[in-house]
Each structure stands twice: as structure tokens, then as C-alpha cells.
Image (cartoon, rainbow, N blue to C red):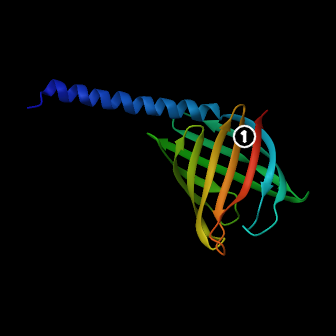
Amino acid sequence: MISIARVLSLGAALLVGANAASAAETEFLQSLEGNWSGTGTVKVRTYSSPIKVSCNFNSDASATSFELDGNCRGLVVVSRAIKASLRVNGTRYDGSYVGAGTGTAGLAGSRSGNAINLGIRWAKEVNGDRAAVLRVTKTGNGMKLTTIDTDFATGKDVVTSEINLRRL
């Protein structure tokens, strides 16, 4: 027979464990807050040539959310606004992404080490389907944004964007 005291202590231990996970996520998110600038490449389609881009972002973080807002410019005249909003609940992340030109995409995933790995659900088909991956990686004093999609024709994963940012 399990005593009430044991059940209460088990419940308290579970709550402490949940708070520790939330504290770890809060600390990680807040380490990504600030103004960022950098360069990288973007492919409009998995089979297209990469376009060099330069980007500027501002990010805000709270205990349970992270927002990245900015723009990237390429080919001198092309500019695109980019925004990602994430919420964390325990160790799960979900939110939205705007910037691919297909409308608001859904994001869902979790963090592993220094990277938040998110599945993307595009608003419309991109490269033959509506799925891709967005990885937000903390790299020392920097941050890397990587989008990976599957080439519909070959079935191979292709990095469609990689942007390396540094804190301003």
C-alpha cells in the first residue's frame, strides 16, 4: 500500500523536475535574445542555385517564448521580412514562421543540446510537399538558422537556407 506522504513526495519531485526543465529552456531562450546580423545562402527551390543573403534580426525572449523578427536581402534588390514566434511548454516548442512566401507556417519540435529542432508545416506546397525542418542553433556568441527540405525528385535532404548570425 502506498502512503499519502509517498504520493505527495513523488508529486513534489515531479513538479521540481518539470520546473528544472522549464528553467533550462528559459535560460536557453534568453541566451538568444538581442540584435543579430549575418550572412548566408538561400535556395528558392531544392534544385535551384543558392542566393547569397545578408540578414538583420531582433529577438526577444521571455520565460516561455522566443520571437525573431527581421529581414534578409539578396541580389541587391530582393528583400524578405522573416518572423518566427515560439512558445515553450515543458520541453516542447510550437509556434509559427513567416518568410517563405507561402503564408504562415506552423512550427513544432524540441531542443537537443544547443539546437531547437522544429518541424515546419508550410501553408502551401513547397518542393513537392508541405514539410521541412528548421534548426535554430546557438554557436558560442552566434546563432545559426538552417532550413532543410527533401528534394521531391531525388528523395534526398537539401539545406535550402543557412544563415550565420553574430550578436551586435
Q: Can you identify the residue that label 1 sits on? A: 58
Q: Secondary structure at mark 1?
A: strand
Query: In the rendered view, would you say 106 is above or below 84?
Result: below
Q: Residue at x 68, y 39 (%)?
A: 59
> In the drawing, does residue 55 fall left or right of residue 129?
right
Which of 49 and 81 lies nearest the eye of the viewer? 49
Which of 26 and 147 lies nearest the eye of the viewer? 147
> In the drawing, does residue 124 fall left or right of residue 13?
right
> In the drawing, does residue 96 fall left or right of residue 76?
left
Which of 40 and 101 lies nearest the eye of the viewer? 40
Q: Position of residue 56 (x, y in %)?
A: 79, 44
Q: Exactly how many numbered labels are in the figure?
A: 1
Quarter of the figure with residue 119: bottom right
Quarter of the figure with residue 107: bottom right
Q: Position of residue 91 (x, y in %)?
A: 46, 41
Q: Quadrant of the C terminus?
A: top right
Query: In the rendered view, would you say 4 is above or below 148?
Result: above
Q: Given the current orientation, which residue lies at the most extreme left position?
A: 1
Q: Quadrant of the N terminus?
A: top left
Q: Position of residue 42 (x, y in %)?
A: 77, 58
Q: Amino acid at mark 1?
A: Asn
Other-residue count near label 1 (Cα within 10 Å), few / some / many at <14 / 14–19 / ≥20: some
Q: Residue at x 46, y 33 (%)?
A: 22
Q: Position of residue 165 (x, y in %)?
A: 76, 41
Q: Residue at x 60, y 36 (%)?
A: 61
Q: Given the current orientation, which residue lies at the most extreme right position?
A: 76
Q: Residue at x 85, y 55 (%)?
A: 52
